[in-house]
Amino acid sequence: MANHAPDNSRRRFIKLTAVGLAAAPFANALLSGTARAADMVSETDPQAAALGYVADATKATKRTDATALCSNCSFYTGKAGEASGPCAIFQGKLVHANGWCTAWAKKAA
C-alpha cells in the first residue's frame, strides 16, 4: 500500500479562497479612508416639511429665537464653520448650518 498524505495546501487554498470571496464586498469599505457623501435634506422631503425645515433660518415663520440655527442645535453633528453637516433628526443626512426646523434644541455648552 502506498502512503498518501493529504494535500493540506490545496485544502488551505480552498478555505482561504472561500473566506476571501465572502469578505470581498466589505474590503473596499474597510480599506478606503473616505466616507460616502451624504445627501442634503430637501425642504420638500416629507419629514423636513413636517418639521418646518428651511435651509435659510431667516425665512422660518415659526422660529421665535433669532439665534436658533442648525449649527447651534443639539442634533447637529457637523463641524463648526462648515456650510453643512449631519443631523440626527434626519437620519444623518446633511442640513445647512444656517437652516432651522421645529425640532431645534439648544446645544449644551
Image: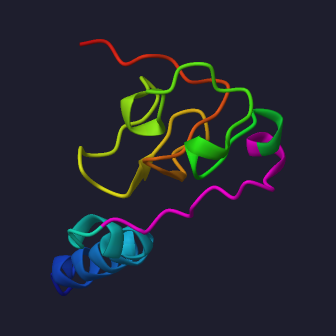
Question: Which residue is painted at 18% across and 76% down in the image?
Answer: 8
Q: Horizontally, is 20 left or right of 103 in the view?
A: left
The answer to which of 22 and 43 lies nearer the viewer is: 43
Give whichever of 91, 101 is nearer the camera: 101
Quadrant into which the N terminus falls: bottom left
Front-most of residues 109 and 17: 109
Instruction: Reply above or below: 79 against 31.
Output: above
Q: Nearer the viewer, residue 23 or 88?
A: 88
Tell me what residue is drawn at x 47 percent, y 35 percent: 69
Number of labels in the image equals 0
Q: Is residue 4 visible?
A: no
The quadrant in which residue 90 appears is top right
Q: Quadrant of residue 47?
A: top right
Magenta span: predominant SS is loop
Magenta-drawn stretch contains 37? yes
Question: From this viewpoint, is residue 31 visible?
Answer: yes
Residue 82's x, y, as percent?
29, 55
The residue lying at 25 percent from left, 85 percent from top is 10
With 39 as the anchor, is 74 left or right in this view? left
| Range shown magenta | 35-48
The location of residue 36, given as percent across then percent down, is 41, 68
Instruction: Point out residue 108 in the picture as x, y percentages from the top left corner.
Output: 31, 12
Whether residue 65 is in magenta: the answer is no
Judge left or right: residue 81 versus residue 50. left
